[in-house]
Structure formats: structure tokens, C-alpha cells
Image: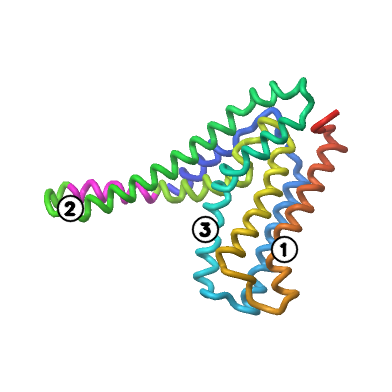
Amino acid sequence: MIRSARRRAEAIFNQPGGGRIEDRLVSRVQLWRAVIGAAATLLLIYTYGADDGWSGVANDGVVKLILAPLLLILTGPLVILGFIRYAPAAQRRLLRSRLRAPLKAVGWYVGILVGVGLVLAGSAVLLKQNYGTLVNGLVALGLLLGLTWLLPFLLFASAYAARYAFNTANVHAVLPAALTVVLVWELMLFSVALEGGMPHGPPAAQWCAVLGGPVSVTAVALWELHRMRTRYGVRVRV
């Protein structure tokens, strides 16, 4: 069921498009950046601790996984509209015509969230009713079993939606990298706000924990954009 959920999420949120560039070197650098970043984060938490311990760290990771696509849905349109506005006038109509794939992916994600919410609410209501206990219980059990597929599907969908920025490469190759930069700084601000301040540790460790991720992601994204321009001839304006 988990394999099925992952494959379905990937099919929806990782659709190949004419604008996407598959650069294996960039993918490897992004992977190693993520691994090193995760290891550094765990080392800082192990050394200086966290407010809610390791369970709080895990919960924070899940919150960020769900929050990332939501932030993309809220702020992504502004970035895309600004991008299209900045593009040459002759290209704007073409770029707008390619928005169907991202809009469809956003619709899927909103539908997934609504579906999970309805299943949870329906199960809770049925289990609390005092009449038709057997029927309601069976229906609620069926809904809860459906969550064993829906919840992994939601997590995989969140990961793929954030990774590929809702298939915005179909609009233009540089959009996923640009949206990633915006997203990582938004997540940093939300993380500091939700945690009520800086993480534990001396000032140097605190600033490394807060800025290490956004700065490293931004650096990799800028390098990716540079490779697109110099190696593949991808430009926003000619």
C-alpha cells in the first residue's frame, strides 16, 4: 500500500514536461546537501538538545513536510506572476498557456487534504453515534483502513509537490529552483516563529542551525541556475 501511494503521488506531482532539465550532477549535489544538512541538524540537536526532545524534532519534520506545499500554494502564484511579468512580452502568452499542469497539481493536493479531513471527521462522527453501532462501526473501520493508504499518499504528495514545485518546470525550467529559494526562507521564518525563538546552543550554533539550510539551498539553487544558463542555454530574458 505504501508503494502504491508513493507511485501514485509521484505520477501526479513529478510529471515530466518540456521545460524540465534532468541534470544528474545537480541532483547528486542536492542529495548530498540534504544528507549533510540533516546530519548537521541532528548533531546540533544531539549536542545542545531541543525543547520537546526527539519526538518534537519528528513532529516538527512532519509539520514542515505539510507546510511546504501549503506555502507554495499561497506564495507560489506571486512568484510565478512576477516571473511571467518579467519575461519578454512575446513569451508571456506562451508561459501562461503552460500553467495547466501546475494548477492541476495544486487541485490534486487540495483535494487530498480535503479527502483526509473528511475521512477523519466521518470516522469520528460515526464512532460517537449511539445508534446503528454495528453498521456505523463497520463504516468507520472501512474509513480508517482507507487512511492507511491516504496518509502515506499525503506525505509522499507533500514531498513530491515541494521537490518539484507543483510541476512548474512545465512553465519554465528555472521556476522550481526559484520557488525553492523562496520556500526555504519562508520555512525558516515559520520555524523560528513556531518554536518561539532561536534553537538551543551558543550563538554561533544557533545561527548555523537557523541559516545553514536556507543559505546552502540558495547557493545550490543559484549554481543550478548558472548551469542552466551556461550549459543548457536557459534564460529568462534574451
- Marks 1 and 3, the one that precedes in the sequence: 3
Mark number displayed over residue 129:
2
Please tell me which residue lies in front, 79 or 229: 79
Q: What residue sits 54% from the left and 35% below the top?
A: 105
Please tell me which residue lies in front, 14 or 198: 198
Q: Position of residue 64 (x, y in %)?
A: 56, 57
- Residue picked out by circle 1: 211
Q: Is residue 86 shown above or below 221?
A: above
Report the magenta residues as a range: 136-148
Horizontally, is 176 left or right of 160 in the view?
right
Secondary element under disc 2, as helix, strand or loop, is loop
> Type of residue at label 3?
Val
Disc 2/disc 3 C-alpha distance (Å): 31 Å
Q: What residue sits 67% from the left and 53% below the top?
A: 184
Q: Position of residue 170 (x, y in %)?
A: 66, 31
Mark number displayed over residue 63:
3
Secondary structure mostly seen in the magenta stretch: helix
